[in-house]
Amino acid sequence: MSNVTIIGVGMTPLGKHLEKKVRHLAAEAIDAALLDAGLTKDAIEAAWFCNTRQGALEGQHGVRGQASLRAYGFEGIAIFNTDNACASSSSGVIQAYAAVEAGLYDIALVVGAEKMNYPENREGMFEAFKGSWDRELADSHIASLLALGEGLSPPPGTAEAAERSVFMDIYAAQARFHMKTFGTTARQIAAVAAKNHNHSVLNPYAQYRFPMTVDEVLADRMIIWPITRSMCAPMSDGACAIVIASKRAAKRLGSKRAVGIAGIAASSSSNRSGQEYDKHLTRVAADRAYAMAGVGPGDISVAELHDASAIAEILHSENVGFCAYGEGGALVESGASQLGGRLPINVSGGLLSKGHPIGATGAIQLFELVTQLRGEARERQVEGARFALAENGGGFHGLEEAACVVTILEKPANA
């Protein structure tokens, strides 16, 4: 049984914070997390700082955490820096979890903070994405990924956006593969985006807070077929902080809203073939997390899945076992994954509409799930939530993401 809990969470609103530096965003999130935990900064024994962009866009290649956390007032404590692409802050959480579980620290802090918007360096904003794959093998990996989509062509005259993240080309290829293999439709992919945009209306932290219909998603500007703009996560600035504590420390502090980390597992990519679905790194991480928590997919009440593009929610709903392979499109189209459905997914709005500040995204997923399990999500509350699952992938390597962390949380005993 896990000995580790989350006793405090805090985040900033997501969007374009052009006037704020990374350290300012981090400080805002830390303030909120410490207040939520009922602590001062002196209670923190170690911290993990998670960021992907400061090196590429500001030249702050090393000691990013020391720079931002010293500015906040942390001195003398252990500070570790975690850059694992989009899975950076969930990777920080698993490292902090391990340190607390091992007894090295009783109370630790994980901070994910990211600025992606630098209008004076727009070319650099897009170039930075290329740091999240193997640069030496990039050409062969991209060719293999794009080959997944061969055999299914866009309708004649379909335009493509000249300016886009290369990851959208990858997601488009994965969408085409799923469409030709399982019969998934563009309308089902659009249903994910519409659902998550509608969810985000209820989330005060979300970057986008307007509803969309499936038809509006399909009619939006084409990025690369079948992916329209509304099916893509935005570039976001923002931060999230999480206070992790041993059960002993949570009890000593009198924390009655401590959410248990029931299971947590990480995986990396392998040389699987495109048809070896059950060897996908997300399935590997999910199976490990389920085994650790002693639960299965049927026990999950609410989930946050890494929907950097709408097709990704379909893929990962299959990879974590919420439905059989090939049935992810039907799952969303049935309404089962919307708020009020059998298994609500991305009630926060997901990366698609809530926002995707890469280094902070995994922590932000946990912020939402902690809020749900405490029963504090207000209009977007999933009633009776007991177990929650977060799936956070990062980068690409070979035919899949380079890294994945799956976390299973359990509601507080008093909730």
Image: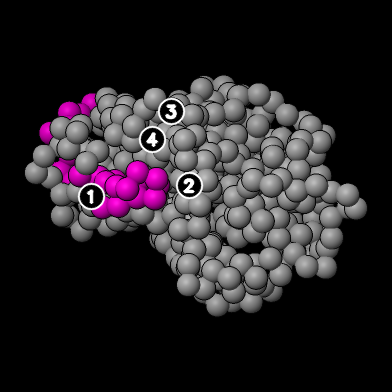
Residue picked out by circle 3: 18
Report the mark closest to the observer, 3 or 2: 2
Q: Secondary structure at mark 1?
A: loop
Q: Is residue 52 magenta?
A: yes
Amino acid, disc 3: Leu
Looking at the rendered image, the quarter that the N terminus falls into is bottom left
- Residue that extends furthest to the left in the rendered view of this protein: 76
Instruction: Sort mark 2 into few (<14), some (14-19) or many (20+) by Cα contacts within 10 Å.
Output: some
Spot occupied by residue 384 in the image (x, y as percentages of width and height)? 53, 34
Look at the image and tell me whether residue 379 can be seen.
Answer: yes
Spot occupied by residue 51 in the image (x, y as percentages of width and height)? 36, 47
| Residue drawn where x is 11% and y is 39% of the image | 75
| Residue drawn where x is 19% and y is 48% of the image | 79
Q: Nearer the viewer, residue 379 or 350?
A: 350
Residue picked out by circle 4: 239
Per the model, the C-alpha gap separating discs 3 and 4 is: 14 Å
Per the model, the C-alpha gap separating discs 3 and 2 is: 15 Å
Q: Which residues are magenta?
A: 38-66
Residue picked out by circle 2: 124
Left or right: where 341 falls relative to 413: right
Residue picked out by circle 1: 63
In the rendered image of this protein, does residue 330 appear above or below residue 112? below
* Marks 4 and 1, the one that precedes in the sequence: 1
Report the mark closest to the observer, 4 or 1: 1
The answer to the question of whether label 3 and label 1 lie on touching residues, with beta carbons closer than 8 A, is no
Amino acid, disc 1: Val
* Marks 3 and 2, the one that precedes in the sequence: 3
